Amino acid sequence: MQIRHIQSSDYYTISPLVNEWWGGREMSDMLPKLFFNHFNDTSFIVENDEEAVVGFLIGFLSQSKKNTAYIHFVGVHPDYRNQQVAKKLYNTFFKVIQQKGRNIVRSVTSPVNKGSIAFHKQMGFNIEEGDKEVEGIEVVSNYDGHGQDRVLFMKRV
């Protein structure tokens, strides 16, 4: 497997895969083409030996918080989960953002995404204080709009 920077043309490969990898959930709206056009330096793809996409990470440097970077979206093909693909993507992102003078990484997930919560904790992220708890996890109410509670993560690198 190899990791490379994302390219604009990767949008046409990844966009159709997103809903499939999420078991039919409508997720592709979370990943507009602008991410593929404007955040190439901090976004990555993992390809298998046949050059098929098996994972990706979309991240960027915060424009308003000069020491912060943000991981917006990560996906791993279901057949490649638990094979360190996401860990390699995150570690690549950490290395690049450190080279760019950033030392804080933030990310957000839904409280129902137990796999994401466990993964972020395993990777050393702290869950930020919320205004309520859902199944023992701190969440911020209505973070992404009415009824869209989110778990907020932060890690120093």
Image (cartoon, rainbow, N blue to C red):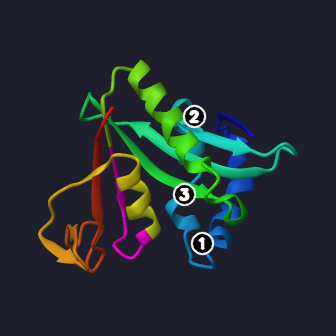
Name the residue: 55% across, 69% down. Answer: 27
Mark 3, residue position: 31
Answer few, some or many: residues within 10 Å of disc 1's Cα (few below 14, many 20 plus, some between 14 and 19).
some
Quarter residue 5 falls in: top right
**Measured from the top left, where is residue 145 in percent x and y?**
28, 72
Q: Is residue 54 above or below residue 79?
A: above
Quarter residue 61 falls in: top left
Give the residue furthest to the left.
131
Residue stretch rendered in magenta on the structure: 106-114
Instruction: Look at the image and tell me whether residue 105 can be seen.
Output: yes
Mark 1, residue position: 22
Whether pointer 2 and pointer 1 mark residues with C-beta atoms closer than 8 Å, the reply is: no
Q: What distance separates the C-alpha of mark 3 from that of mark 2?
A: 14 Å
Question: In the drawing, what numbered circle is on residue 40?
Answer: 2
Q: What distance separates the C-alpha of mark 1 from that of mark 3?
A: 13 Å
For mark 2, give the secondary structure: helix
Q: Is residue 43 above or below residue 110?
A: above
